[in-house]
Image: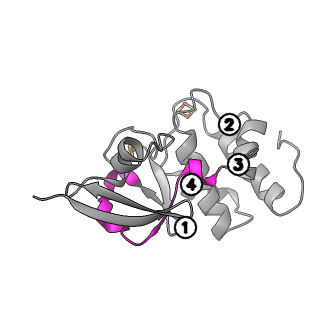
Amino acid sequence: MASTIVTFELGGREVEVLVRPMTTLQSVLRNQLGQTATKDGCRQGGCGSCTVLVDGEPMASCLLPIEDVAGRRVTTLESLTPAEGLHPVQQAFVDEYAFQCGYCTPGMVMLSKALLDHDPAPNDEAIGQALAGNLCRCTGYRPIVDAIRHASGAMSGHDTEPVR
Ligand code: FES
Ligand code: FES
C-alpha cells in the first residue's frame, strides 16, 4: 500500500511524517523523529516502556497505528522535559532513587504525569492501578510509588522532601 502523510502535534509543535500504513507511533517517534526516550521493549503492549501521552492519556505507543494520532496531541518524555532542569515528576524519580537500569523510567514518568494530572493526590490503590501495566524489573516498585507520592506533594506546593 502507498505511503501517506500523517500530521499531529508533538510537544506543542505540528509535525508531519510520511509513513507506510500501520506504522506504529513508537516507530515514528524513535526512527523518524529521534524521540528515543520512548523505549522499544516488548512491542506487544505488555511492558509499558513505550508509554506516551495522547491527548493527555497514557497509551502504549507500540500498539498505536500512527494514523490513529492524526490531529491529536502527543507528549513524550522529551517534550515533557523543560529546557532547563527537570519536570517535578522527573525530579521526584531522582530524589527517590526510583530507577536502576532506567529502561522503564520514561514510561513510568509519563504514566505518573498522567495519573497526577487526573488525581493530584492519588492513594496507594490508585497508584497501584495506574502502575499495573508498566513493568520494572529492577526497583521492586516501592521507590516508584514513593516518587509518585513525592511528586504529588511537590506539584501541590507541599512537602518536597524524599518520602523515606
Ligand atoms: S514496547 Fe510497548 S508495551 Fe512494551
Ligand atoms: S529501573 Fe530497570 S526496569 Fe525499571
Q: Is residue 99 left or right of residue 68?
A: right
Which span is picked out in magenta? 61-80
Which of the 4 image quadrants contains residue 153? Answer: bottom right
Q: Secondary structure at mark 4?
A: helix
Distance between mark 2 and mark 4 Cα atoms? 14 Å
Tell me the mark number nearer the camera, choosing from 4 and 1.
1
Q: Is residue 45 visible?
A: no
Q: Secondary structure at mark 2?
A: loop
Question: Which residue in the protein does label 1 denote?
Answer: 56
Q: Secondary structure at mark 3?
A: loop
Instruction: Single out the residue that lies furthest toward the bottom.
Output: 71
Question: Which residue in the protein does label 4 denote?
Answer: 111
Question: Is the CB of the residue bearing disc 2 within 8 angstroms of ligand 2?
Answer: yes
Q: Position of residue 98 (x, y in %)?
A: 68, 36
Tell me the mark number nearer the camera, choosing from 2 and 1.
1
The answer to the question of whether label 2 and label 1 lie on touching residues, with beta carbons closer than 8 A, is no
Residue drawn at point x = 22 percent, y = 57 percent: 22
Quarter holding ligand 2 = top right
Q: Is residue 71 magenta?
A: yes
Q: Is residue 55 left or right of residue 119?
A: left
Q: Nearer the viewer, residue 19 or 87?
A: 19
Tell me the mark number nearer the camera, choosing from 4 and 3.
3
Q: Is residue 149 magenta?
A: no
Distance between mark 4 and mark 3 Cα atoms? 21 Å
Question: Which residue in the protein does label 2 denote?
Answer: 98
**Dot 2 or dot 1, earlier in sequence:** 1
Question: Which residue in the protein does label 3 denote?
Answer: 83
- Indicate the quadrant containing the C terminus: top left, top right, bottom left or bottom right: top right
Badge 2 amino acid = Ala
Badge 3 amino acid = Ala
